[in-house]
Amino acid sequence: MAAAGGSRLRRAASALLLRSPRLPARELSAPARLYHKKVVDHYENPRNVGSLDKTSKNVGTGLVGAPACGDVMKLQIQVDEKGKIVDARFKTFGCGSAIASSSLATEWVKGKTVEEALTIKNTDIAKELCLPPVKLHCSMLAEDAIRAALADYRLKQEPKKGEAEKQ
Amino acid sequence: MLLRTAWRRVAAAVRVAPGPKSVAPTRGLRLRAVDLFPQSAVPSDTATAPQAESMLRPLYMDVQATTPLDPRVLDAMLPYLVNYYGNPHSRTHAYGWESEAAMEHARQQVASLIGADPREIIFTSGATESNNIAIKELEAAIQPDTSLVSVMTVNNEIGVKQPIAEIGRICSSRKVYFHTDAAQAVGKIPLDVNDMKIDLMSISGHKIYGPKGVGAIYIRRRPRVRVEALQSGGGQERGMRSGTVPTPLVVGLGAACEVAQQEMEYDHKWISKLAERLTQKIMKSLPDVVMNGDPEHHYPGCINLSFAYVEGESLLMALKDVALSSGSACTSASLEPSYVLRAIGTDEDLAHSSIRFGIGRFTTEEEVDYTVEKCIHHVKRLREMSPLWEMVQDGIDLKSIKWTQH
């Protein structure tokens, strides 16, 4: 009857829609179109998400950004006696590019000395992740996070040196 | 003359098959497979794309952005795309007459959905054009104290319903023109231009399961509302909107309006049920979720939720097999969070955390369940990655922290 006719027509219409050439499925979900697969990879296979002991003398913590801006990154580094970064962790409140930038930052600082880590530039991060111009600020914030963590570590080392000199 | 009236009668008989209201169309999980054999004449590199890869399309949960064409609307349009291709303004032959008859029938269908007279409906290319027509002339009104009130009937971001009838009453008592952009409301909530004292209304085709590229503007005749045409030309549509009326598109709009009128009550019940299901499941499983917008004066199909401590775009990226939208800054080109959320006083960090779920006529229970399950899973995951969530768990008050940049 009308219902059967209607559903037949509906199926025909759906079949018509299916036959038309269209983009591969992967391109259809909006964020996937804007994100490079490297960025998506950092979210799906996260590296170094977590926290280190904030109170430890060998751990430097950098907290940059603001919730009101939609971007907050916390980056922590663990440095050994020789001044080499042996471990790094991050946590980020931000878009996919921000998560990927901070994740990449933790990967890159590991194994570097404190001085070498200072040479990491936001442009390198952006190039590695193929960030579009509108997302460059995410890489800048990641660079800021590295510097903030290094500065915090330096600050923690200062009084020790002072005490050693006094004694 | 006689022939034209005869054609009108024939066109009136070609109606959208109403179908029994109580029978629900078969709904199922709408993961459609992409066609594997490329049909296009131009060989593109998608032809060599790995066919073995999962070729499923995302679920569609973004009906506020646009809606799929209702198959009944397509049925109504096809003859006018293939066979009855005459220009509706051609007066001298049957092609023109049959096209004109279809156009007038569509006009009647749109008018009856909003309680208007067909002579008060002008077809346009969409609600944007309608808004421009409505506002342009009235801004330049002669008397300094004549003004225009323009209000959205249902907001497209948070689904809030404005008190249109009350606003209409106030405007008419103060002799002020009242325009409303009803793109998200037509065919979804009952509207009557006379009860609500609306002088101008914008209608969009592709928001009500009709075709894209067409809309209408309702312009009151009694008392007459004068508007200035945006585009000049052959004087079609009573001189208010020149340009050949696209018959297939307006037939689609008319059919969409008629279907909406028949299905409104059922759709509302279905959508409310799914909306309730979605919100209840999410709120029950996740703490710190805020629904944006007045819960009482709310259209159920547009649910805007803020997931605290999780940024909106990262959640959208995680929910990659569901098509959704966000009020977060990252998803807008200007990096500014949604002005609507800001206007209702939402905290900025919550504005960055908002996601809009759109539920429509063709949304299924399985789609809602899948979306909810994925959403809960990824919000939990993103909260584990969030420094704000960590601080809150440690008992720190986020408002007390001095952030490095603002």
Image: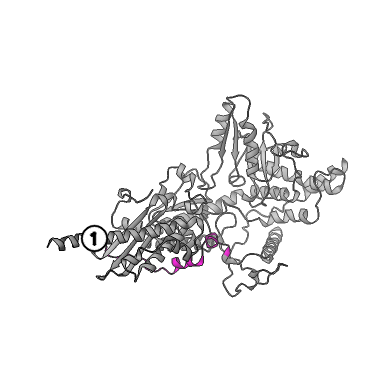
Which residue is denoted by mark 1 in the rendering? A156
Q: Percent x, y for residue B95?
A: 84, 49
The range drawn in magenta is A27-53
Is residue B277 shown to the viewer in this render? no
Q: Quadrant of residue A49?
A: bottom left
Which of B118 and B184 lies nearest the eye of the viewer?
A: B184
Q: What amino acid type is highlighted by mark number 1?
A: Lys
Q: Percent x, y for residue A100?
A: 44, 63
> Which residue is located at x 65 percent, y 55 percent?
B69
Which of B395 and B136 lies nearest the eye of the viewer?
A: B136
Q: Percent x, y for residue A165?
A: 15, 62
Indicate the chain on which mark 1 is placed: A
Residue B363 against residue A81 in the figure, above or below: above
Q: Name the residue at the bottom extreme.
A: B52
Looking at the rendered structure, the number of numbered marks drawn on it comes to 1
Is residue A41 shown to the viewer in this render? yes
Residue B36 against residue B292 in the figure, above or below: below
Question: Secondary structure beneath disc 1?
Answer: helix
